[in-house]
Image (cartoon, rainbow, N blue to C red):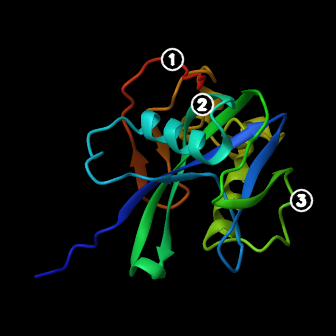
Amino acid sequence: MKTIATFEVGLKAFLVRHGRLLLVRERVAPQLWELPGGRFDAGEETTSTSVILARELGEELGNSLRWELVGLRDAWVRPAPERSTHVFLLGFECRWLAEEIVLSEEHVESRWVGRDDWRGLPLAEPYLEVLERFWMRGPGGCELRTGRAASQRSRSTCAGACCRKVSQPSPSIESSTTASASISTSHSGSMNRTT
């Protein structure tokens, strides 16, 4: 009988401010860069992903930060050898609205990065590939918004927020691999995180 893999589950934010993406640097050695967010806690299996993401961003970036949920952008697995497991991560695009970041003790630095200025930063695994996929489509989700010709990518294959009203959360996204990830949201319209 085949063994089924088990994972911890986490949520990360592609938080975008004026076309720049937020990265945070972990406090623990070797102080690698990653996206802000966190994991589901035990007992939260039926809790809305938007509630968990709001909690995690509030904890890591400060409760005064205001942002809007755009939609699901990507899914990936990150090794967690310190816990002898892996974390299955869902990455949501979020749009910054107001206020500044107040980092928690979990991180030592934050940086808003453009399309290429993140290259050369020491990234946690597998963020090189994750960020390349994000910037390939750009904020808003699709090559159609980054100036590539429409003939290079059919609009019907794009599941990004740019092919829908941007303020609506995405119920599903086509992964950059052959698999697809889907998620249901418990709210309608955009989510504004305020205190």
Which quadrant would the N terminus be assigned to in this image?
A: bottom left
Does residue 36 lie above or below 71 as drawn? below
Dividing the picture into quadrants, the one containing residue 138 is top right
Q: Which mark is residue 189?
A: 1
Q: Can the viewer see residue 91?
A: yes
The residue drawn where x is 59% and y is 37% is 160
Q: Which mark is residue 70?
A: 2
x and y percentages locating residue 88 in the rendered image? 43, 62
Separation of residues labelled 2 and 3 (CA atoms): 23 Å
Q: Which mark is residue 162?
A: none
**Mark 1 residue type:** Gly
Q: Residue furthest front?
A: 105
**Mark 2 residue type:** Val
x and y percentages locating residue 51 in the rendered image? 44, 34
**Mark 3 residue type:** Asp
Q: Nearer the viewer, residue 146 or 153?
A: 146
In the shown orientation, is residue 171 left or right of residue 45? right
Chain-order first, disc 2 or disc 3 = 2
Q: Nearer the viewer, residue 162 or 148?
A: 162
Query: At numbered mark 2, what does the secondary structure look like: helix, strand or loop?
Result: strand
Query: At numbered mark 3, what does the secondary structure look like: helix, strand or loop?
Result: loop
Query: Tag 3: Cα neighbours inside 10 Å, few (<14), some, or many (≥20)?
Result: few
Query: Tag 2: Cα neighbours inside 10 Å, few (<14), some, or many (≥20)?
Result: many
- Pointer 3 residue: 117
Q: Nearer the viewer, residue 157 or 185?
A: 185
The residue drawn where x is 64% and y is 35% is 94
Which quadrant would the C terminus be assigned to in this image?
A: top right
Chain-order first, disc 3 or disc 1 = 3
x and y percentages locating residue 65 in the rendered image? 69, 32
Q: Are marks 1 and 2 in contact (CB under 8 Å)?
A: no
